[in-house]
């Protein structure tokens, strides 16, 4: 299989780079993808960059050039739920844009881009296999909605506004829905994991740098172990 692993920042890619030998490097979009092998799978590791445009551009550039069979997206998120805590792992069921407000432009709901689904649901046989792996190995994780926007959420007031529109949201971040939209258009399965680095509140800026590397390594280790064991 050809598998893409994409993370927003270099600190979140360190685990892969330290544990797997890169055969070659190729430029797609504005980012360099390192190409290596895990358990006879061709793996392309790249940085999405931060924000929706960077994420969409770099993933679309890769998918246009390479026939990718499955995408793993990892990274960090801020918690949007009182029962979701720092270092918790969210296996994303669906993404939506928290900064898309088009209800007055037609028959659209909050978070929906015209012409696109209201929410991007991540359903595939590949994802089901990964869920089976998590369950068989007694790995703790949460499942649910994660919302995406182009701003780092670091105030309780903003968090409450988002939560009012998406009361079922577990996390908030800056790339996921853009990834999901591109994967949907290219019809490529997407498996997305976000590990909580902060509470998306007034203290987020102070704790993000402390936790982002730690949670990035946690998510990377899970995916790497899975790829090493998959048939």
Image (spheres, rainbow, N blue to C red):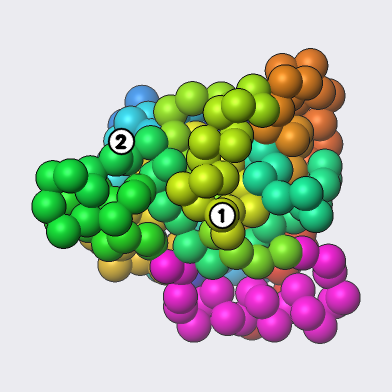
Q: Is residue 200 visible?
A: yes
Residue 215 drawn above or below residue 49: below
Picture coordinates of residue 189 (x, y %)?
A: 42, 68
The mark closer to the camera, 1 or 2, is 1
Write the residue at 78% across / 49% down: 82
Q: Which residues are magenta?
A: 121-141
Picture coordinates of residue 1 (x, y %)?
A: 48, 70
Residue 167, numbered circle: 1
Write the residue at 82% across / 47% down: 85
Residue 57, numbered circle: 2
Write the residue at 42% across / 68% down: 121
Most distant residue in the right direction: 138
Q: Quadrant of the C terminus?
A: bottom right
Residue 89 drawn above or below residue 216: below
Please tell me whether residue 132 belongs to the stretch shown in magenta: yes
Judge the density around disc 1: few (<14), some (14-19), many (≥20) Cα neighbours within 10 Å.
few
């Amino acid at each position: 299989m050809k598998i893409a692993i994409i993370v927003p920042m270099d600190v979140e890619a360190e685990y892969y780079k330290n544990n797997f030998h890169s055969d070659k490097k190729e430029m797609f979009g504005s980012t360099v993808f390192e190409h290596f092998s895990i358990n006879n799978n061709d793996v392309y590791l790249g940085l999405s960059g931060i924000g929706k445009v960077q994420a969409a551009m770099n993933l679309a550039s890769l998918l246009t050039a390479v026939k990718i069979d499955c995408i793993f997206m990892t990274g960090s998120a801020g918690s949007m739920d009182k029962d979701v805590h720092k270092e918790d792992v969210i296996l994303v069921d669906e993404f939506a844009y928290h900064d898309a407000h088009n209800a007055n432009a037609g028959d659209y709901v909050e978070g929906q881009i015209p012409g696109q689904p209201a929410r991007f649901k991540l359903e595939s046989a590949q994802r089901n296999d990964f869920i089976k792996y998590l369950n068989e190995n007694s790995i703790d994780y949460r499942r649910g909605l994660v919302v995406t926007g182009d701003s780092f959420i670091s105030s309780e007031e903003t968090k409450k506004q988002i939560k009012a529109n998406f009361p079922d949201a577990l996390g908030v971040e800056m790339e996921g829905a853009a990834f999901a939209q591109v994967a949907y258009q290219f019809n490529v399965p997407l498996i997305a994991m976000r590990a909580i680095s902060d509470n998306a509140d007034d203290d987020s800026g102070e704790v993000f740098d402390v936790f982002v590397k730690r949670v990035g390594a946690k998510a990377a280790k899970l995916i790497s172990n899975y790829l090493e064991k998959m048939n």
